[in-house]
Image (cartoon, rainbow, N blue to C red):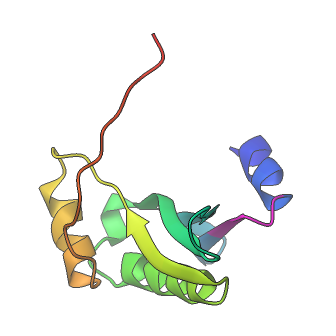
């Protein structure tokens, strides 16, 4: 994890927000900027959001999303997006409570 964080810290298109209390990591949110070809703006994408199970429901995830939003809006983004698997209904409710709307469809093709 440290190596990944070090690598991401070198990129201007990436930001990682960490919530901690007394030196203990409670949650993390990473965000990626995607430049668009058809418009002169970016899209901000949450690429990871994790909060320790024993501290969920205390506003930590919401605060991480708010920090990510502030960063995204300050980097010329048209919109902010997040993907979440169909098997994660609790995460879907959380994102909707944070103001995200279900939209579009994603198609995937994995390397074989």
Residue 12: say if magenta. yes
The quadrant of the picture occupied by the N terminus is top right
| Residue 94 versus residue 11 in the image, above or below | below
The quadrant where residue 99 appears = bottom left
Q: Residue furthest top?
A: 112
The quadrant of the picture occupied by the C terminus is top left
**Residue at the spot x=86%, y=58% of the render?**
10
Residue 103 placement (x, y as % from top left):
22, 66
| Residue 48 versus residue 64 in the image, above or below | above
Q: Residue furthest right?
A: 10
Residue 89 placement (x, y as % from top left):
13, 57
The quadrant where residue 31 appears = bottom right
Q: Which residues fall within the magenta stretch? A: 11-16
**Residue at the spot x=32%, y=60% of the render?**
53
Say whether residue 26 is visible.
no
| Residue 75 versus residue 25 in the image, above or below | below
Residue 86 placement (x, y as % from top left):
16, 46
**Residue at the spot x=65%, y=76% of the render?**
40
């Amino acid at each position: 994890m440290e190596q990944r964080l070090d690598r991401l810290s070198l990129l201007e298109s990436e930001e990682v927000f960490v919530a901690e209390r007394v030196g203990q990591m409670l949650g993390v949110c990473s965000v990626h900027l995607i430049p668009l070809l058809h418009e002169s703006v970016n899209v901000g994408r949450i690429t990871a959001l994790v909060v320790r199970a024993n501290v969920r429901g205390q506003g930590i995830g919401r605060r991480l999303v708010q920090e990510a939003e502030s960063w995204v809006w300050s980097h010329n983004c048209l919109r902010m997006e997040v993907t979440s698997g169909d098997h994660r209904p609790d995460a879907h409710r959380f994102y909707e409570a944070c103001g995200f709307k279900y939209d579009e469809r994603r198609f995937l093709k994995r390397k074989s």
